[in-house]
Image (tube, coloured by chain):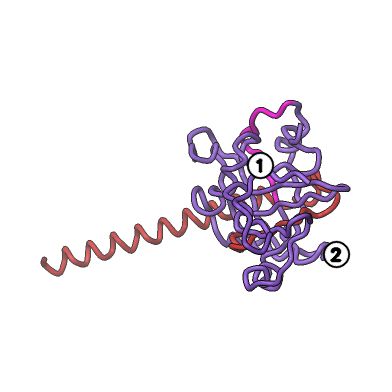
Chain colours: A red, B purple
Amino acid sequence: MNPPRLAWLAATTLLAIAGAALATGKADDVALKQIAGYRTWTRVNEKPVVVENPTGAD
Amino acid sequence: MDLRVVDAPSTSGDVRVGSVPIITSSRGTTSILMPGAILIRGSSKTAGTNSEDKRTHDGGVKSFGVIYANGPAGDAILANPLTIFPINSIIVREKRATPADEQPQHLTVMIKRERGFNPKANDWEFLSVNATGTKVLQRQKNGSCVKCHATQAATDFVYPVNNFLQR
């Protein structure tokens, strides 16, 4: 593979990665705005729910 | 106490929660025992004499949740009977270390996306967010979140709390 083509491929890959990161960051920002002020929403349970989870998955 | 699904009793007489979480409500407090938790026979409490119990209680995997629902989700919760949560329903659970804590350790969030977003989970997206709500730590369409919530398919992947959704 000749050097110009290799450089083009590298640049394209970097752009794709950067684009994906930007998209993810934007989606995160949207989600964070969606939940901003959540404590003013309906509180479903008066007393905290007790969760026993041996896997610690949450 | 409503034991719905448990595996065979262990040799100690305790029982281990089976593949479906156990949900109980008493005096306004809801308890959710996830698969693998161990129940002492004849008691609603879990406690530990063996290493796995010790891990449950000392390892920080027992937590307390305070749950909030936005407008669409709140309306769906109050609907009788519940059919399905509408798009843009959002449910936030604060994970707290103790019942008295005012500040969460982190937030777990369910957001109902557009139809077709995540068919395996009724189009819910699951997020883990830091305590201050300023950073998304994890996003999931599949994985451990969906695996557990799938046991609650009858209530659109949402765990019932107190009288809500338990009609």
Indicate whether B126 appears above or below B136: above
Horizontal side of B102 relative to B86 (left or right) equals: right
Subunit that carries the residue with mark 2: B
- Residue at (48% x, 37% y) in the render: B119
Residue B100, numbered label: 2
User: Magenta region's main secondary structure?
Assistant: loop
Quarter of the figure that contains the C terminus of chain B: top right
Location of residue B112 (image quadrant): top right
Label whose residue precedes the other's in the sequence (1 or 2): 2
Residue B158, numbered label: 1
Location of residue B131 (image quadrant): bottom right
Subunit that carries the residue with mark 1: B
Mark 1 and mark 2 residues within 8 Å of each other at the beta carbon: no
Amino acid type shown at disc 1? Val
Give the magenta part as a residue range: B81-92
State the separation of the CA atoms marked 1 and 2.
Answer: 24 Å
Outermost right residue? B27
- Residue at (47% x, 53% y) in the render: A23
